[in-house]
Image (cartoon, rainbow, N blue to C red):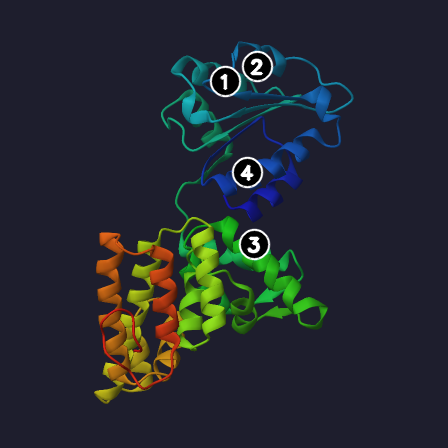
């Protein structure tokens, strides 16, 4: 059952038990729909009992399920972290669910549940076991489209692909990107295009390494130093920053080498690999350099790598000098300590 199917089912009636397992984001989304629907406007403080499996005593839950709700049609008994339920607790909750008390609703959720348990079997019988453990590509696409639609927007197929390629199954991150894109396009546009999304989309890595490499690729010294400082101040290890820079420069060198070999623009993009947008951007950046410049840049990175790992010079100073040299104009000099690329 998808979230959309759940919403439709809740309008038709409330079951006596819901078991929701799998990806935490979708579990939270499902529970946030089930509980209000089950309470139907009743006062939650009087009719919503919460437990955490593995920490709370669940013995009162059975009695509460039999207790009449106060100024509401149902009482909701919610149990979180169901993966920690003991066999006897699973059986006891399953027994309550099987009795079908229409003045109560069990909402059990967590990462997983013993599918052989009485509770799981009863939820399956009622068709209310929602398993979000593994999302298919179609489910993710449908979720993205619905998330955009909930904000009054449609979303282009290539923008959907960019989101899934960038974030995999991280629905929280994709929702944040859709929210930003919605605000970005405003009321003037009903559809989120790829260009709109890319204007606001956070880099695949939480760090600003792509901002840094973009600035280096564009030879923008001030921006490159700004992003470098931000990364270091946010706790990124100098060796990791250096490694990311080196990898990016090697990608630019590979792009130029393929172009020099006569490959078509599209073949070069495919050869660079990775996210199509990032690969296209790398190919565009590579045009700002001569192939020989990039070879020297990679050699320079190798020398700086040695200095970083031997710790004889201040790491930050080494990286700043490296970035300045990588952003420098042509007229390369010797390759001793950081010199022009």
Specify which label sits upstream in the sequence, 1 or 4: 4
> Viewed as shown, does residue 293 lie left or right of 160?
left
Circle 1 — which element? helix
Circle 4 — which element? helix
Query: Could you tell me residue 46's position as x and y percent?
Result: 72, 20
Callout in the foreground (1, 4): 4
> Viewed as shown, does residue 300 lie left or right of 209?
left
User: How far separated are the C-alphas under marks 3 and 2?
Assistant: 36 Å
Q: For residue 272, what is the image quadrant? A: bottom left
Q: For residue 33, what is the image quadrant? A: top right
Query: Could you tell me residue 63's position as x and y percent?
Result: 60, 10
Look at mark 2 in the image and give the residue it sits on. 61
Q: Among all residues in the image, which is located at the extreme bottom? A: 262
Callout in the foreground (4, 2): 4
- Please name the residue shown 54% across and 67% down the image: 197
Quadrant into which the C terminus falls: bottom left
Q: Which label number is shown at residue 93?
A: 1
Specify which label sits upstream in the sequence, 1 or 3: 1
Density class for disc 2 (Cα within 10 Å; few <14, some 14-19, many ≥20) is: many
> Viewed as shown, does residue 290 lie left or right of 117?
left
- Please name the residue shown 61% across and 57% down the image: 179
Specify which label sits upstream in the sequence, 4 or 2: 4
In the depicted view, which residue is nearer to us: 165 or 311? 311
Query: Could you tell me residue 324's position as x and y percent?
Result: 39, 71
Above or below residue 106? Residue 289 is: below
């Amino acid at each position: 059952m998808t979230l959309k199917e759940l919403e439709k089912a809740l309008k038709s009636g409330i079951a006596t038990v819901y078991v929701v397992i799998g990806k935490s984001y979708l579990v939270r989304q499902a529970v946030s729909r089930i509980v209000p629907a089950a309470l139907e406007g009743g006062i939650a403080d009087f009719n919503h009992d919460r437990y955490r499996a593995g920490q709370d005593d669940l013995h009162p839950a059975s009695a509460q399920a039999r207790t009449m709700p106060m100024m509401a049609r149902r009482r909701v008994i919610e149990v979180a972290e169901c993966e920690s339920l003991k066999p006897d607790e699973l059986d006891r909750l399953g027994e309550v669910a099987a009795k079908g008390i229409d003045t109560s609703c069990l909402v059990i959720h967590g990462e997983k549940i013993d599918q052989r348990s009485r509770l799981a079997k009863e939820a399956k019988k009622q068709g209310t076991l929602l398993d979000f453990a593994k999302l298919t590509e179609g489910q993710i696409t449908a979720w993205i489209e619905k998330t955009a639609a909930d904000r009054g927007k449609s979303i282009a197929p290539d923008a959907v692909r960019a989101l899934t390629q960038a974030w995999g199954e991280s629905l929280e991150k994709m929702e944040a990107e859709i929210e930003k894109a919605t605000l970005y396009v405003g009321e003037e546009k009903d559809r989120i295009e790829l260009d709109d999304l890319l204007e606001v989309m956070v880099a695949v890595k939480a760090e600003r390494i792509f901002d840094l490499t973009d600035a280096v690729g564009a030879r923008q010294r001030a921006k490159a130093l700004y992003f470098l400082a931000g990364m270091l101040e946010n706790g990124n290890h100098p060796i990791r920053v250096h490694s990311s820079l080196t990898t990016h420069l090697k990608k630019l060198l590979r792009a130029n080498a393929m172009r020099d070999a006569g490959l078509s623009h599209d073949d070069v993009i495919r050869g660079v690999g990775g996210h199509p947008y990032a690969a296209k951007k790398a190919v565009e950046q590579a045009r700002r350099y001569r192939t020989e410049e990039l070879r020297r840049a990679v050699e320079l990175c190798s020398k700086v790598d040695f200095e970083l790992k031997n710790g004889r010079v201040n790491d930050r100073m080494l990286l700043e000098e490296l970035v300045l040299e990588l952003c420098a104009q042509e007229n390369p000099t010797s390759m001793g300590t950081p010199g022009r690329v």
